[in-house]
Image (cartoon, rainbow, N blue to C red):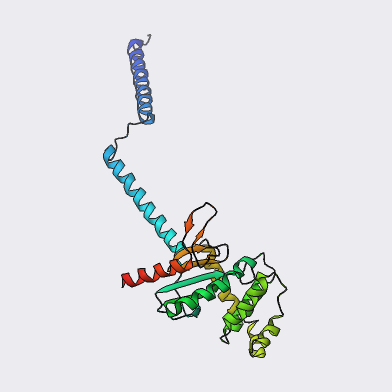
Amino acid sequence: MKKKTSPRRFTDEFLWAIIAVVLLAFIGLWIYQKTMNKPQAITPATSTQDQTAIAEELKIANQEALEKITLTLSEVPPINDADHLLGPLEAPAQLIIYTDFTDPLAAQFVPIIKELKSQFGDDLVVVWRQHPLVNNLFSNDAAIAIECAAKQDKLFDYAEQIALLSAQEQILPEWSELASELGLKVDDFNNCLTKPEVQATIDQWSAEAEALGAIGVPSSFLNKKLLSGVYPLEDFTDSDGQVKSGLVVLVQEAIKANQAAD
């Protein structure tokens, strides 16, 4: 007896159904992936007005930070215990000078400052801070010698002799010989020449000068206002034909401004 077979129609319909489901699944997956990969529109967190305000705040904050840096670098450090003072600390006019006494141009400033100090007396305090230039052969050694003379209260006497010879571009003396001529205790002077703290003080002043942009010498600060180069005592006409105040007028103005502030 022959066996009865099941109709194949059912089986074919079932297979077509499976295929349809699989195709729909693939189509759905394809649509999902396309949707996920498609760049989405970003909703701004803030309005254009808010964004402009934020940008302005950032600009102001950055400008304030820049001004603080500029102020830090452009304001001369106040007088301290390591300084050499010519005049009283409380003088209404303070003139801080970064200089190299071996530089021929800067050396010409020394007699000018000496005369300026004599005119104003205790109303003016002059502070010398050494900034030996690297291109001057003996500048650093001279700076050390001047500092050692200062330890025996002979700073200006010693520096004045160095400046006088430098301004005339003459050969500088042997450091100990000049110390002897000025009546210093030579043994103490010689011992001082090798002390690392002396060099450290000079390096500190040079670092200050460079941070302030006072690369050339002399660079002076009169009540924290920068005066670059050798200023004469009297008013003068600069290279641009402009009349500028000399040191006498500038110091007078500094004294008046200080007194008005008090």
Q: Along the horizontal axis of the image, is 124 left or right of 261?
A: right
Query: In the rendered image, is residue 4 in sight?
Result: no
Quadrant of the rendered image containing residue 19:
top left
Q: Please identify the quadrant where the N terminus is shown.
A: top left
Tally of numbered tags:
0
User: Residue 155, percent across and down?
Assistant: 58, 81
User: Residue 53, percent across and down?
Assistant: 29, 44
Quadrant of the rendered image containing residue 160:
bottom right
Quadrant of the rendered image containing residue 148:
bottom right
User: Residue 127, percent across and down?
Assistant: 50, 75
Give the camera-side residue of 162 and 116. Answer: 116
Give the camera-side residue of 119 and 215. Answer: 119
Whether 237 is drawn above or below 176: the answer is above
User: Residue 7, percent across and down?
Assistant: 34, 10
Tell me the residue at 47%/71% (across/down): 95
Whether 185 is drawn above or below 8: the answer is below
Tell me the residue at 40%/57% (across/down): 67
Q: Along the horizontal axis of the image, is 60 left or right of 195?
A: left
Q: Please identify the quadrant where the C terminus is shown.
A: bottom left
Q: Along the horizontal axis of the image, is 59 left or right of 169?
A: left
Query: In the rendered image, is residue 13 in sight?
Result: yes
Give the camera-side residue of 201 and 139. Answer: 139
Whether 229 is drawn above or below 181: the answer is above
